[in-house]
Structures are given as C-alpha cells and as structure tokens.
Image (tube, helix red, strand yellow):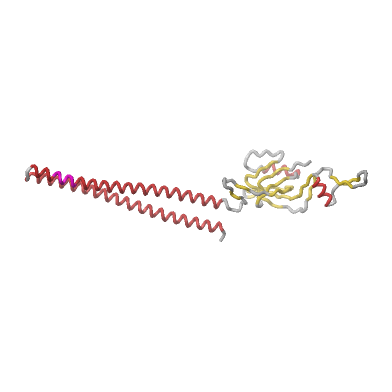
Amino acid sequence: MDKKEEELISMHYQMEKTDIKQQRLEDRLISISEDLKRSKRRRNFYFIFILILMLLLTAGSLYVILGEKENITKTESLEGDVDVQRLIFENDSLQKEVDKLKTDISKYQNEELSNKADTITSLSGNTGSGKEEEADGKSKLKFERKYCYINRVYKSNDVVFIEADIIEYYQGRKAVKKAKELGEAEYDLDKNGDTLYFLYNNYYIHNQSSRSKILELDDKARVKIENINQISSGFPLKAFQKVITDKPVLILEINNGIVYKITEQKLP
C-alpha cells in the first residue's frame, strides 16, 4: 500500500469518526429538546393546578373570616409563584444549554470541513508532479534545460505531447573546441604555419542520437518563439505545428518528464 492510499484510508477513517461524533451531538440535542418540551408541559400543568387550587381556596373562604381567607390566599399565591419561578429558571437553563450545544455543533462542523479541505488539497498536491511546496504556498520547480529539434507535436486525451530530438548546442569558443574534437571544424594556416580552427557560423550542433523522445507539455506551458503570440493560457498547437517545419533550435525547460517552457535559440 503506497503513501497516497494510506492517506486516503486515514482521511476516510477521520470522516467516519466525525460523522459518529456529529450523530452523538445531534442525539444529545434531540434529548435536550424533548426535556424542554416535557418541562413546558409540566409548567402548564402547574399553572392549571394552581389556578384550580386558588379557585377552591376562594370558594372555601366563604366559610371563614375575611382575615383567614386573605392569609391563606397570600400563602398559596406565594407558593405558586415559587413553583412558577423555579420552572422558568429550569426552562431558561435548558434553553441556554441547547443554544450552547448548537453553537458547539456549528463550530465543530466548520473545523472538520476545513480539515477535510486541507487534507484533500494536500493529497492533490503530492501526485508526482515534481513540485516542492514553499512556505508561501507557491510551487518551486527544478528545471533541466535541453536543446532540441521538435519533429512532431500532437494532442491526445486533452494532453499535448511533443516528439523531441535532443541535441547538443555550442557557441563561440566552445563550439570550435567541440567541432575540432569531432573533426568537423574548419581550419586554415597562419603566416607562421600554425593551424587555426574556426567555424563560419560561430555555432556547432552535435546530434549524438537520432532517437526521438516523447515529452508531455504542461497545460500552462509558456512558449517564447518568433511568430507565435501566446495570448491565452492554452497551448498554441496549430501555430506551433507550422513553426517546427523550419526546424528551429528550441530550448526545453523540463521537470520530471514534463515541459513547462519552450524558447527559441537565436542563431548567430
């Protein structure tokens, strides 16, 4: 099992744990809501009970003196107020707990969604593209430059490929030295009889192998070639196909088998 599969399994496990925890919180919310409903019903029952009791006491007050009737009424009224206040206090406490629980659930869901997004983003950024993430979040690529002729460019499954003939390009003294080593430099004798080596074009191209190499182009590959105006992020396929018919010397900037930039080498 590779690292990517392990990370996907770990993410799936974390998501299942999150769902279980959320379900427990929801169950707790339902339980509290039911307690709140029962509390409301009990409070209504107390109100009715107190009302009936007060009516009975009022009716009974006809058989006692006025003072006793008032004392009994005040006493029962105070007892009823205490019960009502206790029920209201319990109801307010339950309501506060429900509101707090809702806030905790919302906060927890937002945090989990943020963690899932970070995990998915992390997995997507490690799929072998050759990118090394910096602290500022930008991608840093290590390119290797290759000179080449491009024999063919085509598109397959929405991906652009090039068939590149890799060459060695030298200019100035290095060109003369390399051509001399391979016996392809021009030469002449000076007035002292010494041999002078030179090249008329002041550059030398050595094609060590005629085998072509298939390379993939990045979907945002940059092209800096004369007669090609790259005004969009897409690759100018048709214009590029026309340019390579003249076999210009091109420079490829490659990372992990993917071409990110193509530049034309100006010949002396």
Question: Which quadrant does the N terminus fall into?
Answer: bottom right
Q: Is 235 on the left or on the right of 95, as rendered?
A: right
Residue 59, percent from left and from top: 10, 45
Q: Is 220 on the left or on the right of 121, as rendered?
A: right
Question: Which quadrant does the C terminus fall into?
Answer: top right
Residue 267, percent from left and from top: 77, 42
Give the answer, above or below, for where 172 lies relative to 1: above
The stretch of residues the image draws in magenta is 73-79
Q: Taking the image as drawn, is residue 161 in sight?
A: no
Residue at x 65% of width, y 45% of height: 221
Given the current orientation, which residue lies at the most extreme bottom position?
A: 1
The question of residue 74 being in magenta is answered with yes
The dominant secondary structure in magenta is helix
Q: Taking the image as drawn, is residue 115 in sight?
A: yes
Camera-nearest residue between 64 and 32: 64
Camera-nearest residue between 161 and 148: 148
Camera-nearest residue between 61 and 72: 72
Residue at x 76% of width, y 49% of height: 168
The question of residue 257 being in magenta is answered with no
Residue 85, percent from left and from top: 24, 46
Q: How many marks?
A: 0
Residue 139, percent from left and from top: 60, 47
Residue at x 74% of width, y 54% of height: 211
